[in-house]
Image (cartoon, helix red, strand yellow):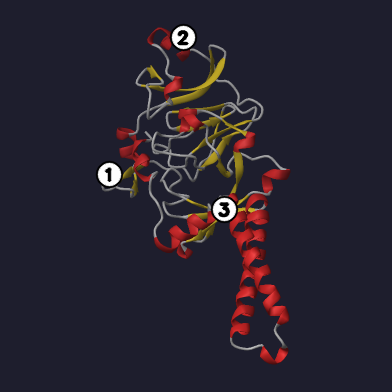
Amino acid sequence: MFTSTLLAQTAEPQGFLGWVDRLARTPLSQVVIFVAICTVIRFALWPYLARTAPHQRYGGYTAAKLFNEFLDAVIYAGVFVFLIIRPFLVQTFYIPSGSMIQTLQIKDYIIANKLVYRYSDPQNGDIVVFKPPKRALFAHQGETDFIKRLQGKPGDVVEWTNNVLYRNGKAVDEPYKCFTVNDPPGSTRFRNLTPEEIEAQVPRADFRLVKYKGKLIPINIVDGIVNPGPPYNAVEFAIPPEDQEIVKGLPAEPVPPGHYLFMGDNRNNSFDGRGWGLVTRDAIIGRSECIWLPFSRWRITR
């Protein structure tokens, strides 16, 4: 479980798509500096444009006027897009891994609604962009955003047993769920496993949240071992041998207030909340609304 997805997590978009991704992730400080420079140039040009007599307004004047109008458009666009739309309304994100296959493919670009969670809370089934806890990141990863499906709100008791998701004791209908394998091996292409392959190849990792030594932690029981380590669990959730049997008997605990549990749709190839735990409310960025690039993949995401 989880391992093959790691091959895709360093994928970087190239060409036009790479430019779109870099533009979407431009730090706000750089945007402010760029807008400030454009503003200074615009004000520097203004005296020349204002002093030029009407009968001399051609040649260099025309070029300066067009450039001034271009700077004006850039300033307004920069302020509107990067200081209003991106922080408060919508933002585009690039999908670098296969953890949300079949819903989202590697190299998809999605539009996230950042306004919706300003007046409402995330709901189970939402596809959410969020800042992951540090324990969810691998050594080669810097600060990044994750996208997964919400499967546990505050108060929900969530369990994963025999490849079936249970919420508050009831099996959850998951038409989006899939089990995959890299095909060919070592690539970032995925193929759905057949029911026979799922039975033979996908480990039975029973998951739940439990209270252990006063802390709420995720546990995965694989071949009788609790939290066998990466790729099943973050290192800090390792259970010593002497406590293994005790932890196996602990009951499932509900998701606490102000926290959320996320899972990938590509269930055996997603390093998610089952391995690294919960996400706090203030780390949630927005809800995926649609795929907008490539154009051939345009669709609402649900």
Residue in view at x 66 percent, y 88 percent? 57
Say few, some or many: other residues with alpha carbon within 10 Å of mark 1 (under 14 / 14 to 19 / 20 or more). few
Question: As drawn, which residue projects farthest toward the top?
Answer: 242
Question: As drawn, which residue projects farthest toward the bottom?
Answer: 55
Residue type pointed to by label 3:
Gln
Which residue has dot 1 on it?
186
Task: Looking at the image, tell me whether mark 2 or mark 1 is earlier in sequence order.
Answer: 1
Which residue has dot 2 on it?
246
The mark lying in front, picked from 2 and 1, is 1
| Location of residue 29 in the rendering, given as x and y in whole percent from the top left corner | 59, 50
| Location of residue 242 in the rendering, given as x and y in whole percent from the top left corner | 40, 7
Residue type pointed to by label 2:
Ile
Residue type pointed to by label 1:
Gly
Which residue has dot 3 on it?
30
Secondary structure of residue under mark 2: helix
The picture quadrant where one finds residue 3 is top left
| Location of residue 252 in the rendering, given as x and y in whole percent from the top left corner | 55, 20
Task: Looking at the image, tell me whether mark 2 or mark 3 is earlier in sequence order.
Answer: 3
Residue in view at x 52 percent, y 32 percent? 133
The mark lying in front, picked from 2 and 3, is 3
